[in-house]
Image (tube, rainbow, N blue to C red):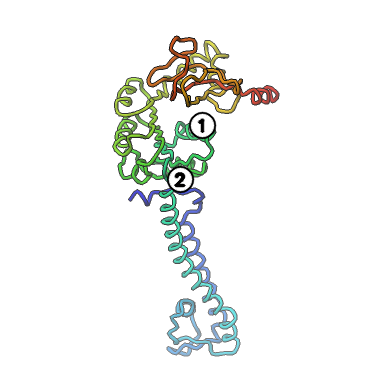
Amino acid sequence: MPGDRFRFVSVKKDPLLAIFQRVLLAILLLLVVTLITYIGRDGYTDSQGDSPLTFIDSLYYATVTITTTGYGDIVPSTQVSRLITTVVVTPLRVLFLVLLVGTTLQVLTNQSKIRFRRKRLEKQLSDHIVICGFGVKGKAALEYMRNHNDDCAAIAIDPSKEALDSANAEDVAGIQGEASDLEILKAARVDLARTVIIAPSTDEQAVLTLLRVRELNKKATVVASCREETNVELLRNSGADEVIVSSSSAGRILGMAAEAPDAARVVNDLLTFGDGLDINEWQVEADGETLVRDDKPAETPIAVVRGTDVLRPGDADCEPLKRLDRVIYIDTNEEKMKRTQTIK
């Protein structure tokens, strides 16, 4: 079931390891009682015979005593053995019972806690971000979005345990499984998501995941990553709002770095939020607004997106701006640039 695959933040300890440790402790307690009985075997009476207790007899007595079974065939018969039973063996018996009951209670408590946290998370999953594939690309995408909005809620989907451990380290809950699985997407409440980032390891998975996402949510902004340029149109036609070709983009930057290293440095600066030059956008709220805002001198407009058209400053139709236009600009972040230069 998808609900059983939730990986929550701060779940660190392996439950199997905890149970194994408790079993070892229970065996240790049993052996302690056995040794105490065997060392003081002369103070015990066996109803089955008058010979001194053997090690097996001592183990048997320790087992029925520490588990409170108490058949009564072997009993302490001297003052010393009875004192040892009262002062040492009885507390060990209580500790053994607490250990067993505690293990059961912990398992039940953990299961209840997981169910509670899952239900609470499901209630919080609205207008959130779903990241399908929490590898290098998915993690970097979340980091960029959080730099713009610290309060954005997110959930990761990935088949890899290591990837979900990485998501948990970023305070992101996750679901283990393939994002193309319809039930997994439902568990992540994709139907209520604001943004879906699709960054799986293969283009085939990207296409299938995109189709599943659009089956559940027609309105969310969906951004997909692919390796081959030949699959861009396929992803767009499947419902992606934007498609990023990771291999060719990286290749272009590498070529730029070889031929024009300073230009490549600027591009990297633009792609790294908060490091000097930031690329961002703002939405026009009313007709007639100007491209350059007087109260934002650090902003340098580079494009205006109007519907599906991209206009450049200086184009005849660019100004005046219209309501719902989106202005793409470079924020020079002068203070951050000064700090960076000072550090350098």
Q: Is residue 301 above or below residue 49?
A: above
Q: Is residue 1 above or below residue 220?
A: below
Residue at 33% over, 51% down: 1
Element assignment for label 2 = strand
Residue type, mark 2 in image: Ala
Q: Is residue 221 visible?
A: yes
Q: Position of residue 107 (x, y in %)?
A: 44, 62
Q: Position of residue 66 (x, y in %)?
A: 49, 77
* Residue behind mark 1: 144
Q: Is residue 198 left or right of residue 25?
A: left
Q: Position of residue 21 (x, y in %)?
A: 50, 61
Element assignment for label 1 = helix
Q: Position of residue 189 (x, y in %)?
A: 37, 44
Badge 1 crowding class, 10 Å Cα cut-off, few under 14, some 14 to 19, many 20 or more, is some
Residue at 49% over, 39% down: 152
Q: Quadrant of the C terminus?
A: top right
Q: Is residue 7 above or below residue 232?
A: below
* Residue behind mark 2: 173
Residue type, mark 1 in image: Tyr
Determine the image quadrant of residue 309.
top left
Badge 2 crowding class, 10 Å Cα cut-off, few under 14, some 14 to 19, many 20 or more, is many
Furthest-right residue in this view: 342
Residue at 35% over, 48% down: 2
